Amino acid sequence: MKIGILGCGYVGSVTGAGFAELGHDVLLVDIDEAKVNLLNAARVPVYEPGLEELIARNKARLHATDNVEMLADRALIFICVGTPSNEDGSIDLTYIRSAAEDLGGVLAQTSTFQLVVVKSTVVPGTTETVVKPALEAASHKTAGSEFGLAMNPEFLREGSAVTDFFEPDRIVFGTEDERSQHILEALYRPFHCDKMSTTIRTAEMIKYVSNAFLATKISFANEVGNLCKRSGIDVYEVFRGVGLDRRINPAFFRAGIGFGGSCFPKDVKALIAEAQARGEDPRILRAVIQVNEAQPLKLLELLQRHISDLRGRRIGLLGLAFKPDTDDIRESRAVPVVERLQAEGAVVVAYDPQAMAAFAKRFPQITYASPADVLTSDAVLIITEWPEFERLDYTGKLVIDGRRLAKAKQEAAVYEGVCW
Ligand code: NAD
């Protein structure tokens, strides 16, 4: 099938490369010329394990452009543009709106039936009340008969996005017309996982509720972890026991310094804003965010037990990405930690295997160094659980660990773990 992808970030580039691997002809479109040039040179616009190889292997079937009109010959077009937060936490639909307007112009030029599939995470109702009217107005065509419209939420995780593309837990199709439904079913036939067909609004909601539930598990684990820490109990042992209950899935009870990334914080906040706009007070979700915002500051609390006055003290950070195996720093827990360290007058020295360039754009004033340099600091804070940090030598160091690094615990002269 001729597939088009609008938006070549983490989701768009992995989805495009994945479908090319399955034999489809894929055209990626992005307004960011740098990403387009990288993709056409068979290079990756984002760091994701396995993606570069996948793109290189499929370069004959994978092309990129910044000209949206080139999508005119595509039978199916995925919208994968970003849906960030507004200042108040509500969803910012600027990119979705402009993508839909651009695509409407494309649909206007064609006489064939094209299917537009929203893959971006959007609050329930967006596909039908924002995307559909924009497509119809610009194309002068009717959704459901002259072109197809569907919502197919994406569940991939950064860091394992390529594997997640090929081995998803489930695929959800939100459709309102049979033709769109059949096209999506045919596209996803090679995937042997659970597949669920539902309405567009329900598909949109499934994505938010999945993320909100996982975020809730993490904040719950952190609240329990904070209590366990005070009681001298190992929270991971507690959840190992809790997880043996078949009604409770053991995954994701990850006590630590909280969740970050491009999805959980923004999606929980968007769901809160959506609930409030509809007259509901989502108390659990508000608490999930409150716990998450307080959690990284636990590191500072533990650090100041040992160095109460941080002025002029050299504090090293290991890890800046929001999790291992990504260069993404969106909502990384490193951000509030660095802000607080700077406010306290500390000299911050940091290392991350992939995310230093992105972090330096936001924090040019801190020093970026090798892991060995970071380890010469007065104290070392572990922010991200990159596997390579398990190979460093922590002997004689003061280590404050947000992520449970066994080697650091064994070797450090002084060790404090947020969840250990
Ligand atoms: P991203 O910011 O990495 O990429 C979005 C891309 O869209 C950018 O390259 C941007 O230049 C491009 N873009 C914006 N407007 C455009 C337009 N009009 N035409 C063409 N390109 C345009 O975002 P992402 O992380 O890939 O996320 C995309 C969507 O998928 C979001 O809604 C997100 O919530 C959702 N999602 C993300 C993940 C994840 O792990 N990153 C997982 C599941 C779902």
Image: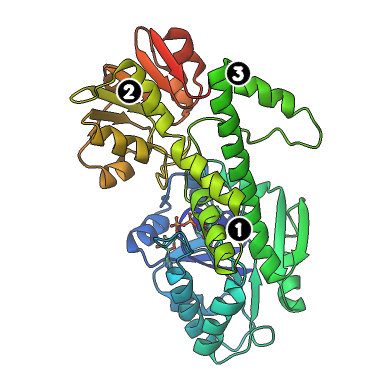
Q: Position of residue 236 (x, y in %)?
A: 62, 23
Q: Tell me which label, 1 or 3, sits earlier in the chain.
A: 1
Label 1–label 3 contact, CB within 8 A:
no
Viewer-proximal residue among 144 and 232: 232
Label 1–label 2 contact, CB within 8 A:
no
Residue tagged 3: 234
* Amino acid bearing label 2: Pro
Q: Is residue 418 above or below residue 17?
A: above
Q: Position of residue 176 (x, y in %)?
A: 72, 76
Q: Residues within 10 Å of mark 1 (few under 14, many from 20)?
A: many
Q: Tell me which label, 3 or 2, sits earlier in the chain.
A: 3
Check residue 19 in the rendering and tell me which mark sits there, or answer none. Answer: 1
* Amino acid bearing label 3: Asp
Q: Position of residue 129 (x, y in %)?
A: 58, 79
Mark in the foreground, 3 or 2: 3
Mark in the foreground, 1 or 3: 3
Disc 3 within 8 angstroms of ligand 1 (CB): no
* Amino acid bearing label 1: Phe
